Amino acid sequence: LHLSIRRQRQMCIRDSIKAARDELEAGGALGAGDQYEQMLTKINPNIRCDIIYPSDLGASVPSGKALSDYDGVAWTGCSLTVFEDTPEVNTQIGFARACFEAGVPGFGSCWAAQIAVVAAGGICRANPNGREMGFARKIVLTDAGRGHPMYEGKSSVFDAYISHVDEITHMPAGSVVLAGNSFTRVQSVSVLYNGTPFWGLQYHPEYDLHEMARLTWCRIDKLMGLGFFKDRQAGENYVDLLETLFQNPNRTDLAWRLGIDDDILNEDVRRLEVRNWIDKLVIPTMLAKSRG
């Protein structure tokens, strides 16, 4: 993990709070940081990752390293609400600002977009439409999004995995809305703060059908209360449907019942934004360091 070995792109992954991690892992879900590491290293096998938990007591980057040593910082989702004044939230806002100040390009899902916007001076609030869960439908690129390098090669309208209750309401200076849909006005952002770029998605390219199934299973009782399922059996049937399609990806009948296509099922399509971030921000950062 030496930066002098230029083929290795060092990544720092920020993961969720411990209680939420434990709950999801007990339900069979892979840890959010592990999901991100698998996704990043599958896209580019030369990537090496350190996973840190900035809300955990005593958390820090590995000994002997500074944030500026990394070529990129990837943020996972989180169960917290960014506009709450709690030590866990404030610690992460501070960490996000430190990443901006270190000049390390950032990327991430859900909480990632929110924390980047708030750290740069923007505002998030509870989404008046409630929870957006499962699949975000008809995400549409803005004019800025259609010309943005993160979306190079992406369809201008697409679906994606999603699970959230908050949304970005006020963009800070130096930030641009790249995509939205009828449920959530801001589905992706480009933030520039202290001269450092951050590309954030409200949706989850790291998920697959299995991970969405495990997340849904852990949330069945909550989702019943919100009207997503009439009873627990309905929720478990839905989870089984997701798992069955995951195990049998050629079951077009199940994909039809769920109303999903390559936006969800094709890994290369749903993770294009991540690949573009690596190719267009992380690798240039690494090369600039090597020249310096």
Image (spheres, rainbow, N blue to C red):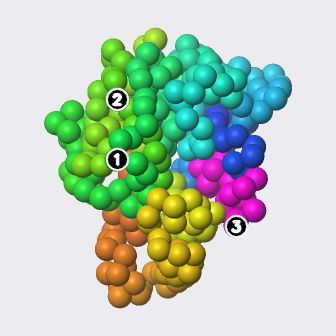
Say which residue label 2 marks.
169
Q: Nearer the viewer, mark 3 or mark 2?
A: 2
Q: Number of callouts in the render?
A: 3
Residue 268 picture location, percent across and down: 40, 60
Q: Mark 3 and mark 1: span between their CA atoms? A: 29 Å
The stretch in magenta equals: 22-38
Q: Nearer the viewer, mark 1 or mark 2?
A: 1
Q: Residue at x 42, y 32 (%)?
A: 125
User: How many C-alpha atoms fall within 10 Å of the one at disc 2: few (<14), some, or many (≥20)?
Assistant: some
Relative depth, front residue between 8 and 159: 159
Residue furthest toward the left?
143
User: How many C-alpha atoms fall within 10 Å of the one at disc 1: few (<14), some, or many (≥20)?
Assistant: few
At mark 3, the secondary structure is loop
Q: Mark 3 and mark 2: span between their CA atoms? A: 33 Å
Q: Nearer the viewer, mark 3 or mark 1?
A: 1
Amino acid residing under circle 3: Gly
On whether residue 89 falls in the magenta region, the answer is no
Say which residue label 1 marks.
129
Q: Is 19 placed above or below 6 here?
A: below
Label the magenta part by its dominant secondary structure. helix
Residue 287 picture location, percent across and down: 51, 27
Amino acid residing under circle 1: Asn
Lower sequence index among marks 1 and 2: 1
Say which residue label 3 marks.
28
Q: Residue at x 81, y 22 (%)?
A: 64
Residue 24 is left or right of residue 109, and the answer is right
Relative depth, front residue between 253 and 267: 253
Q: Is 23 placed above or below 217 here?
A: above
User: How many C-alpha atoms fall within 10 Å of the one at disc 3: few (<14), some, or many (≥20)?
Assistant: some
Residue 51 is left or right of residue 282, and the answer is right
Q: Mark 1 and mark 2: span between their CA atoms? A: 13 Å
